[in-house]
Image (cartoon, grey):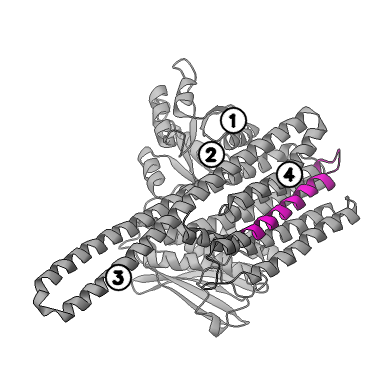
């Protein structure tokens, strides 16, 4: 491996240290809080104190790591800092492995579920922070999960043995994902280093030839020819740079898919556990786990969305649509959150107009502003309103929150910058909401402005172009209270990831659907011969094995049964390829990780539309 690439990998590794320390600090605190009333408090405090002490030590080591340009670049220095980090990761792994041995109590499913979920979540999160150095990741996975597997094996019953097997499969899958992420990252860094060197060489060559041209006018024709050659070389270098950017896009797509897969399974299994967990303590722990997974989903979505905007893979789909229903939906979705905080979420004057924009991206901008306002408002209200301003409509989000100091107004749209959150509380987000708003503002050409007074609140505004007329495409109505029953409805489910496939099947069967599972196009087609009843819905992952895609599997199954069966495509992709393929089939796209509520809403919507279509066709149909 190139020395510069190795140096960049170790810099990336240490940049992940704050997140790693925060995760260990927060999760150990949550475990201590949940188990405080039932566990041996001396053991619990000793275990938590060991983790917190190591967090402090690692914090000083992270602070001592030299910042560029003093960062280590020599092989010995890189090896030393890498060894320090590997040792720290191993100690953290041993700490969580120790939790499995010390804190899980026999006959108590609460402690087992809690520790297993936390260790599993920490193991999945370690892919993002430790994939730069595989030995550290492998040691962390081994030291944190093997004691859990050993504890499960010691149970001796079939359930414990099955869970131990699932633990081994889960760790193996994470190791494979980490290896793929590491390979992609190294390749991207190598391409970037090659481009940097090539551009540096070309810059020196152009400078030399320019001096020769100034010194020897007699060789003017030769120098012109050399300059043309240099320009050609620079075009080649630019093409290489574009290829490197495409490589980054491919890496982003792979990372998005691979990181979302285990989180998708965890979300679904947590929902499936609701049918089996009894008792107030067990239900309370499960609710906490689900909340933690929701927070993790939000953080992952924000990070990947920002990366997707940075590599310009988001293309707006401009259309005419009425603005008021979009704003009403956004206000309704945050009403309960605002009420829990004890503040009012109000809608001011809403102009009855149609606009020209991308409904999804504009909705994301407004949602981020409303969510930001609710998060930083503790007393008073948040008001969402819009009014016409010439040929544009101004959407305003006003709050009575903490406000923004004048010297901070220029920084609020920076990534990871948060006002009033110096302790970096992860429950208050990553500080990416306004950064995403700014990126989408540039893509849609919707100017964003802010007015704020410290201690009195802020007003964020978005200017959106009006449509030529109020006519807009009719949007689908959400399903009513009389949504179709799930019992007996047949669903064909296609996913090449066994963990996600089993999790989806468990949730769907728990809702009363009859599920037929398959890992590929060929398997699902073989399970629906002409004599078998056809499925009423097809759910397919977009990326399947052997470079196959889920939309092709949907087409093949439709052709086999001879019916235009509705389809849902699940994807963790960041580009537009999946959306284009699904649109051509008339299929719905859900982006991973999909929550059970999102999946249930999509099923109710699709089956509701089927019933509505049948009623419109009448008895003769």
* Quadrant housing residue 275: top right
**Which residue is painted at 47% across and 50% down in the image?**
184
C-alpha separation, residue under disc 2 versus residue under disc 4: 31 Å
Q: Range of the magenta residues?
A: 82-110
Left or right: 167 with respect to 12? right
Asked whether the residues under the numbered discs 3 and 1 touch, taking CB atoms below 8 Å apart as contact, a structural biologist would say: no
Residue 478 seen in this snapshot: no
Query: Distance of mark 3 from mark 1, alpha carbons?
Result: 64 Å
Which one is closest to the eye, mark 4 or mark 3? 3
Q: Which of the pair 573/191 is nearer the observer? A: 191
Which residue occupies the extreme top position in the image? 531
Q: How many angstroms separate mark 1 from mark 4 (CA)?
A: 29 Å
Q: Quadrant of the C terminus?
A: top left
Q: Main secondary structure of the magenta part?
A: helix
Alpha carbon distance from label 2 to label 1:
11 Å
Task: Report the residue marked by disc 2.
Answer: 603
Q: Which mark is residue 513?
A: 1
- Residues at circles 2 and 1 in contact by the CB criterion of under 8 Å: yes
Q: Residue at x 85, y 54 (%)?
A: 44
Note whether 458 is above or below 322 in the view shown. below
Q: Secondary structure at mark 4?
A: helix
Disc 3/disc 2 C-alpha distance (Å): 58 Å
Rendered image quadrant of residue 515? top right
User: Which numbered disc flags the more N-terminal residue, 3 or 2?
Assistant: 3
**Mark 1, other Cα within 10 Å: few <14 / some 14–19 / many ≥20:** some
Q: Position of residue 466 (x, y in %)?
A: 35, 66
Nearest-to-viewer mark from 3 and 1 = 3
> Circle 4 is placed at which residue position?
116
Q: Which residue is mark 3?
A: 203
Q: Nearer the viewer, mark 1 or mark 4?
A: 4
């Amino acid at each position: 491996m190139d020395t510069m690439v190795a140096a960049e990998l170790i810099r990336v590794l240490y940049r992940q240290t704050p997140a790693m320390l925060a995760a260990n600090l927060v999760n150990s605190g949550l475990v201590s809080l949940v188990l405080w009333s039932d566990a041996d408090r001396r053991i619990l405090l000793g275990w938590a104190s060991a983790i917190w002490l190591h967090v402090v030590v690692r914090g000083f080591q992270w602070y001592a790591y030299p910042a560029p340009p003093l960062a280590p670049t020599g092989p010995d220095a890189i090896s030393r800092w890498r060894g320090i980090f590997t040792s720290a990761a191993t100690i953290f792994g041993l700490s969580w492995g120790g939790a499995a041995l010390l804190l899980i109590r026999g006959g108590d499913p609460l402690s087992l579920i809690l520790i297993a979920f936390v260790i599993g979540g920490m193991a999945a999160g370690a892919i993002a922070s430790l994939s730069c150095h595989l030995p550290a990741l492998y040691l962390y996975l081994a030291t944190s999960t093997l004691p859990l597997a050993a504890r499960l094996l010691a149970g001796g019953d079939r359930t414990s043995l099955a869970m131990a097997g699932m633990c081994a499969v889960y760790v193996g899958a994470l190791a494979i994902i980490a290896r793929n992420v590491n390979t992609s990252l190294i390749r991207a860094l190598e391409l970037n280093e090659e481009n940097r060197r090539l551009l540096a060489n070309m810059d020196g060559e152009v400078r030399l030839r320019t001096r020769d041209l100034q010194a020897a006018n007699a060789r003017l024709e030769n120098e012109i020819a050399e300059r043309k050659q240099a320009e050609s070389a620079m075009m080649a270098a630019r093409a290489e740079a574009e290829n490197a950017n495409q490589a980054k896009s491919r890496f982003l797509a792979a990372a998005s898919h691979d990181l979302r897969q285990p989180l998708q399974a965890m979300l679904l299994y947590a929902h499936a556990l609701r049918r089996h967990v009894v008792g107030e303590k067990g239900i309370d722990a499960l609710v906490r786990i689900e909340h933690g997974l929701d927070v993790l989903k939000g953080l992952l979505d924000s990070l990947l969305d920002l990366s997707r905007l940075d590599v310009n893979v988001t293309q707006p789909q401009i259309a005419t649509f009425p603005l008021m229903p979009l704003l009403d939906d956004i206000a309704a979705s945050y009403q309960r959150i605002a009420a829990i905080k004890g503040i009012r979420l109000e809608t001011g004057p809403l102009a009855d107009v149609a606009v020209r924009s991308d409904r999804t991206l504009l909705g994301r901008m407004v949602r981020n502003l409303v969510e930001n306002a609710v998060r930083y408002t503790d007393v008073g209200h948040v008001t969402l309103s819009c009014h016409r301003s010439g040929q544009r409509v101004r959407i305003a989000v006003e709050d009575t929150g903490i406000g923004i100091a004048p010297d901070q107004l220029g920084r609020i749209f920076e990534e990871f910058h948060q006002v009033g959150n110096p302790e970096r509380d992860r429950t208050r987000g990553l500080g990416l909401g306004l950064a995403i708003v700014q990126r989408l503002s540039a893509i849609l050409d919707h100017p964003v402005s802010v007015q704020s007074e410290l201690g009195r609140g802020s007003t964020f505004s978005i200017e959106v172009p009006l449509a030529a007329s109020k006519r807009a495409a009719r949007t689908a109505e959400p399903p009513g209270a009389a949504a179709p029953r799930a019992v007996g409805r047949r669903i064909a489910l296609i996913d090449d990831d066994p963990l996600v496939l089993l999790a989806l099947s468990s949730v769907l069967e728990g809702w009363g659907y009859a599920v037929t599972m398959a890992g590929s196009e060929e398997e699902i087609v073989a399970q629906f011969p002409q004599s078998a009843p056809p499925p009423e819905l097809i759910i397919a992952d977009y990326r399947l094995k052997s470079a196959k895609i889920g939309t092709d599997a949907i087409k093949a199954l439709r052709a086999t049964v001879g019916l235009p069966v509705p389809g849902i495509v699940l994807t963790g992709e960041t580009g537009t390829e999946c959306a284009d393929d699904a649109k051509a089939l008339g299929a719905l796209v859900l982006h991973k990780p999909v929550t059970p509520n999102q999946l249930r809403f999509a099923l109710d919507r699709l089956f509701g539309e089927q019933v509505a279509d049948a009623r419109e066709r009448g008895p003769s149909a």
